[in-house]
């Protein structure tokens, strides 16, 4: 009994403290990301985007000071993310939960955003369902179906591919990519002549590539994690003569990150990818962003993760301006709905219905420009929505 | 020269003396209640420490007492976590019965695995446990329709404990729940290690060749303790599922198996409370260090581990009790 009373008392005192913290003139943003472990590089690029935005726009919005608190999950750990989110809310008294490098992190924290009534901004995690977990969640990155369903349709209608083969890594994003590409492609009228999954471990693609050769498709859609796999696949395809333009190679943009192109060398030439951000796209907003980013990060170029973080901060800043510093989840979500702005990636809008991103999907091809291989935008599909939202209902 | 009968009585008296709750232990169990009043904003961390400690105690039973080196115990932790999660998804969200069922299931799997475990030692044992752990993690990954794959299990819905205490945002219920599980686990583990069965386990650890010579059915003993340990690890996993309402592949990861061994070495193996202390130090250090620098906190854990192994080879608790004994003369 005494314990219960004491617990209730401390709870009361604690709440009073956190209320007091809110009343002060700061807006606390808790970032939950995988700063250590195998996804640390992704988190660091996101952080660099966030830092750049704050450096450019000051740390004061609507008369309030922005304070950032970083928490490390170490990887795709839902339980860890949930605990960190709980602590951020009850101990640090944050007003906004943000970051989220990986889907399990976002799903783990979603319940806290819902229960604790906090505005939550997903800056990278790319599984469709995340935004459906709570009405307080808004996303500024992309979803895999968004990029690849549009890509499948494009491949049939614009690139004239009639039949294709898919090879994806055996993990959830790979399966998502395969499904959504196949949906876009077959709905448009194309035919999938073969589908294969490759293991996540050390790359040896010779058997897979032989099977592709036997099926002799016009195009191969691949989705494999970055790192050692892309160059290995590039080599295996080249050895068996399955290179563009004879066989088109289609993929999501991670396959042709600058580092990946470098390690693939000439085998990268002609690969066609789909992405929502292209560093090389010639556009004044983007050029200024790339320049500032490189200056702030010792020459390192921004990528899709940096842009997710950058735009996430933009959303938070603009929403706070609209609410006049009110940090309640309801007000911030309302302010975000339908918000539209010119981002380094092009025009983007927060869908008022799904709170997810509506944006252009760029189709890029690896070409030689001034003696250097890079992603050249060859087509743009404007205002693409995530096709899966509302499907489950 | 004593007669055999009286020496047996002596032995039993000695065992009973060993099994008595010491004042230090009572002080410890009172101390773990402090966070409820003093650190109410740290209760979620405290509950995860209690869960990790229960997991570490289960590993201590096999590693510290029976000498079974394992690098794959997260397999049972994760199985328990998924079992509890799937049970709530199937519509039965009552936590206590969920714990029991998850524990029984993992104990059953532990029993099956134990037939293989007792056949090998040393490096081969390490490889077998490591391999089984990796296989289970990969199995859960490929059974995406059941486990949700890398996205984690969705739709875990746990009912309030005793139909009354909801798992709240502050973590009051979570900590009380995890602490109760830890207490029951430690009480059971104490009972085991302070029995003649526990002594025979230590015999296996110290000298495997002599055990058959004195007629001890050591293989069966190892199987029993391995099964119990598996069940306990599964319960720890189930508690994690219940308190966080999430299950991800990470619960089966090699990292978790390795971290728990690090905790045991930090705290000291073969003394139960060493496992708890190790888990607490590891988790608190990680929390504090990663607040200071989220990118490179593991460096400090590595440094701490090296210092402990170099200067306190019996772990922090072992070192402390050695110190106490020396001071006491």
Image: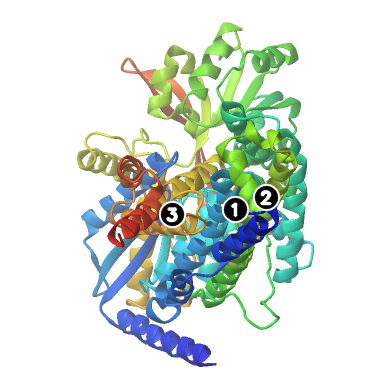
Chain letter for the residue marked with disc 3 in the picture: B
* Disc 3, SS: helix
Q: Earlier in the sequence, mark 3 or mark 1?
A: 1
In this figure, which residue is indicated by the disc labeled 1? Answer: B58
Label 3 to label 1: alpha-carbon separation: 13 Å
Label 2 to label 3: alpha-carbon separation: 20 Å
* Disc 2, SS: helix
In this figure, which residue is indicated by the disc labeled 2? Answer: B230
Q: Position of residue A303 (x, y in %)?
A: 38, 39
Marks 2 and 3 in Cβ contact (< 8 Å): no
Front-lying residue, B233 or B8: B8
Q: Position of residue B73 (x, y in %)?
A: 60, 44
What residue lies at 60% left-to-right and 42% top-to-bottom?
Answer: B203
Chain letter for the residue marked with disc 1 in the picture: B
Q: Do marks 2 and 3 share a subunit?
A: yes
Chain letter for the residue marked with disc 2 in the picture: B
Q: Mark 1, residues whose alpha carbon is within 10 Å: few (<14), some, or many (≥20)?
A: many
What residue lies at 58% left-to-right and 68% top-to-bottom?
Answer: B183
Image quarter for residue A368? Answer: top left
Front-lying residue, A336 or B153: B153
Q: Is residue A49 left or right of residue B63?
A: left
């Amino acid at each position: 009994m005494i314990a219960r009373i004491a617990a209730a008392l401390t709870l009361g005192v604690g709440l009073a403290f956190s209320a007091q913290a809110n009343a002060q003139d700061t807006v606390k943003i808790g970032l939950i990301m995988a700063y250590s472990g195998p996804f640390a590089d992704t988190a660091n690029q996101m952080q660099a985007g966030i830092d750049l935005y704050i450096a450019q726009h000051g740390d004061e919005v609507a008369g309030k000071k922005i304070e950032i608190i970083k928490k490390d999950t170490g990887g795709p750990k839902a339980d860890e993310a949930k605990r960190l989110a709980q602590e951020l809310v009850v101990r640090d008294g944050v007003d906004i939960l943000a970051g989220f490098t990986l889907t399990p992190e976002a799903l783990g924290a979603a319940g806290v955003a819902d229960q604790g009534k906090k505005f939550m901004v997903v800056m990278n995690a790319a599984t469709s369902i995340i935004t459906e977990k709570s009405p307080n969640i808004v996303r500024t990155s992309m979803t895999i179906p968004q990029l690849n369903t549009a890509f499948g349709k494009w491949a049939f209608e614009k690139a004239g591919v009639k039949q294709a083969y898919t090879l994806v890594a055996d993990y959830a994003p790979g399966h998502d990519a395969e499904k959504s590409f196949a949906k876009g492609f077959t709905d448009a009228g194309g035919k999938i002549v073969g589908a294969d999954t490759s293991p996540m471990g050390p790359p040896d693609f010779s058997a897979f590539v032989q099977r592709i050769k036997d099926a002799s498709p016009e195009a191969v859609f691949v989705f494999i994690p970055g790192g050692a796999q892309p160059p290995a696949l590039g080599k295996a395809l080249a050895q068996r003569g399955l290179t563009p333009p004879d066989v088109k190679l289609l993929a999501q943009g991670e396959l042709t990150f600058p580092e990946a192109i470098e390690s693939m060398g000439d085998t990268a030439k002609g690969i066609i990818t789909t992405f929502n951000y292209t560093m090389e796209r010639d556009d004044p907003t983007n050029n200024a962003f790339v320049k500032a980013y490189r200056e702030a990060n010792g020459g390192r170029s921004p990528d899709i993760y940096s842009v997710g973080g950058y735009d996430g901060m933009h959303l938070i800043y603009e929403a706070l301006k609209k609410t006049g510093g009110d940090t309640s989840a309801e007000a911030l979500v309302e302010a975000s709905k339908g918000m539209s702005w010119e981002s380094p990636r092009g025009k983007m809008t927060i869908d008022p219905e799904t709170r997810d991103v509506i944006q252009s999907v760029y189709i890029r091809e690896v070409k030689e420009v001034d003696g250097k291989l890079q992603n050249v935008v060859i087509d743009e599909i404007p205002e693409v929505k995530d096709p899966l939202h509302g499907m489950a209902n | 020269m004593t007669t055999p009968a009286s020496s047996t009585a002596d032995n039993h008296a000695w065992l009973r003396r060993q099994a008595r709750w010491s004042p230090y232990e009572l002080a410890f169990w009172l101390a773990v209640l402090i966070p409820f009043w003093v650190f109410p904003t740290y209760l979620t961390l405290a509950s995860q420490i209690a869960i990790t400690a229960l997991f570490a105690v289960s590993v201590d039973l096999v590693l510290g007492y029976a000498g079974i080196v394992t690098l794959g115990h997260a397999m049972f932790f994760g199985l328990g976590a998924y079992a509890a999660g799937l049970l709530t998804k199937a519509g039965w969200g009552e936590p206590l019965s969920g714990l029991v069922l998850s524990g029984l299931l993992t104990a059953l799997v532990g029993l099956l695995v134990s037939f293989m475990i007792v056949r090998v030692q040393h490096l081969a044992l390490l490889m077998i446990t490591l391999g089984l752990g990796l296989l289970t993690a990969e199995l859960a990954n490929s059974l995406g329709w059941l486990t949700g794959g890398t996205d984690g299990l969705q739709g875990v819905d746990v009912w309030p404990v005793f139909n009354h205490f909801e798992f709240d945002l502050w973590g009051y219920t979570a900590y009380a729940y995890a602490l109760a599980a830890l207490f029951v686990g430690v009480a059971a583990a104490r009972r085991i290690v302070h029995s003649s069965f526990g002594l025979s386990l230590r015999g296996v650890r110290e000298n495997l060749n002599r055990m058959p010579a004195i007629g001890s059915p050591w293989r069966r003993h190892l199987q029993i303790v391995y099964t119990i340990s598996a069940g306990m690890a599964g319960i720890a996993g189930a508690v994690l599922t219940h308190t966080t309402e999430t299950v991800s592949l990470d619960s089966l990861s090699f990292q978790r198996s390795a971290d728990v061994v690090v905790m045991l070495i930090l705290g000291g193996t073969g003394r139960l409370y060493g496992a708890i202390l190790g888990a607490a130090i590891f988790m608190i250090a990680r929390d504090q260090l990663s607040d200071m620098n989220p990118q490179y906190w593991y460096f400090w854990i590595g440094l701490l581990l090296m210092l402990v192994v170099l200067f306190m080879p019996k772990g922090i608790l072992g070192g402390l009790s050695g110190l106490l004994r020396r001071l006491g003369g």
